[in-house]
Amino acid sequence: MVNTLSSALEVVVRTDPGMVRGHNEDAVFANPNQGFVILADGMGGYNAGEVASGMATMLLSTELEAAFATRPPYAVDSSTGEPYAHRCLMDKVALTNSAIHNAAESQPQYAGMGTTLVAALFYDNQVTVAHIGDSRLYRLRGEEFSVITRDHSLLQEQIDSGMILAEDAKYSQNKNLVTRALGVDPVVEAEINDYPVLPGDVYLLCSDGLNDMVEDEEIQLTLQMLAANLELAATQLIQMANDNGGRDNVSVILVKVLSKFPAARSWWSKFLAWFR
């Protein structure tokens, strides 16, 4: 299989402790050659959040790298009819959750630790997104800027139920209370969805240290102005969060789609596709 991902995707990764926190409990990872990126925002006392997010990115990336080295993400899962990427992410996230939970249970200093997670896997002109908690994935497509993920948080539930207006959410005391996290419980369900990808798209994965400090409209404007220079865009986003107070760690991963990246299927699979 010829890997076109490294030339089709531009990836920039940044993480910063912010202006208040003494250490960084966010963790980020990118593998442009296999087309996936991972961001985690840890929680827990005594630096346990740092351990949880580090375990999440390290374990999940290792598992995904091994899995996709033997089977391509676009392969169809015979049991579900979905791309293998979908099932693989679900299984590997569950495995990572168990590892973090077991570490928290067996080591008192890590009791109760957990982490958010947002992971994006690019393949065959699409992206599969898995997320848990309130770290987000945004997409800039032309003039349209939208949140692809939906926060697993008490605040989001209150907005959905009509208890609070979306425009008043920024003033809520429940801003950072997540309803789902990796490693806290023995089992957690990741929300996984597939989206078509177009050349020119810019994807932003971020911890809430960015979107709590910077309005979505400002994030959009920054990406539109600096889309031609992702390095500068990432630096500017973190600077804006810090300039506005930097009350939390802030991490961003930017992925720009430079060209199409169809799967390099064999002639036999293309032949069989005619009969589906």
Image (tube, rainbow, N blue to C red):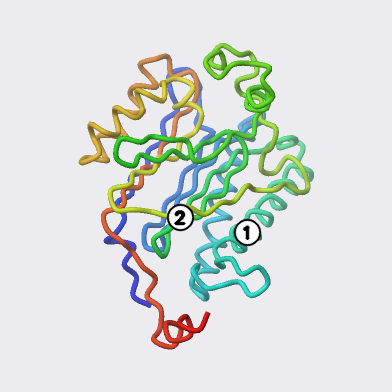
The residue at 71%/37% (across/down) is 110
Image-based side of 205 in relation to 46, left or right: left
For the image, the number of numbered tags is 2
The local secondary structure at tag 2 comes to strand
Position in image of residue 223 (x %, y %): 30, 34
- C-alpha separation, residue under disc 1 versus residue under disc 2: 17 Å
Above or below for 174 versus 61 = above
Residue closest to the eye, 96 or 166: 166
In the image, which disc is placed on residue 92? 1
At x 33% / y 49%, what residue is drawn? 11
* Amino acid carrying mark 2 in the image: Val
Question: Residue 5, image x and y in percent?
Answer: 34, 63
Q: Nearer the viewer, residue 87 or 106?
A: 87
Q: Is residue 91 above or below residue 142?
A: below
Residue that carries the numbered disc 2 in the rendered image = 127
**Looking at the image, is 2 positioned above or below residue 122?**
below
Residue 195 rendering spot, x and y as whole percentages:
47, 52
The local secondary structure at tag 1 comes to helix
